[in-house]
């Protein structure tokens, strides 16, 4: 067994799935449809509908599609990648506030 060594952000994104990150934080998808995983938002207390989505998206100047997340019930939340999601769980910082807020 040889340990997988990932040093490139793109390579890490291809191996570290957002569903795994969500699962480690105690969240499971409520719905799987349209090629998306739909969750109750883990970052809003008032959420009762699965509006926090994980999906594949092609980003300009990237070698291929990558996982992204978005919360469609909160227009202030920007899309993010797996690093943004981990940072959100690690810091508890709301995604709609700038860093340091």
Image (tube, helix red, strand yellow):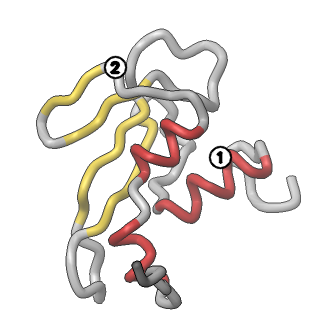
Q: Is 46 above or below relative to 36?
A: above
Residue at horizontal 65 percent and vertical 46 percent from the top: 96
In this rendering, the answer to whether 95 lies above or below 26 is below
Label 1 sits on residue: 96
Q: Which of 37 and 3 is in front in this view?
A: 3
Residue at x 71%, y 43% (from the top left corner): 94
Q: Is mark 2 on a helix, strand or loop?
A: loop
50 relative position to 43: left or right: left
Task: Tell me the number on the disc at residue 8.
Answer: none
Q: Assess disc 2: are there few (<14), some (14-19) or many (≥20) residues with their C-alpha within 10 Å of its C-alpha.
A: some
2 or 1: mark nearer the eye:
2
Q: Where is residue 26 in the image (x, y as percent from the top left)?
A: 57, 28
Q: Which of marks 2 and 1 is nearer the N terminus?
A: 2
In whole angstroms, how far apart are the C-alphas of marks 2 and 1? 23 Å
Q: Name the residue under label 2.
A: 30
Residue 59 image offset from top left, x and y in percent: 29, 74
Provide residue 63's location: percent of width, then percent of height. 24, 87
The residue that appears at 66% across and 17% down in the rendered structure is 45
């Amino acid at each position: 067994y040889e340990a997988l060594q990932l040093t490139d952000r793109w390579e890490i994104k291809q191996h570290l799935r957002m569903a795994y990150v969500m699962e480690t934080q105690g969240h499971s998808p409520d719905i799987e449809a349209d090629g998306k995983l739909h969750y109750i938002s883990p970052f809003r207390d008032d959420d009762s509908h699965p509006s926090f989505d994980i999906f594949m998206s092609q980003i300009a100047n990237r070698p291929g599609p990558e996982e992204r997340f978005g919360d469609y019930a909160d227009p202030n939340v920007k899309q993010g990648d797996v690093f943004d999601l981990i940072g959100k769980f690690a810091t508890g910082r709301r995604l709609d506030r700038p860093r340091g807020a």
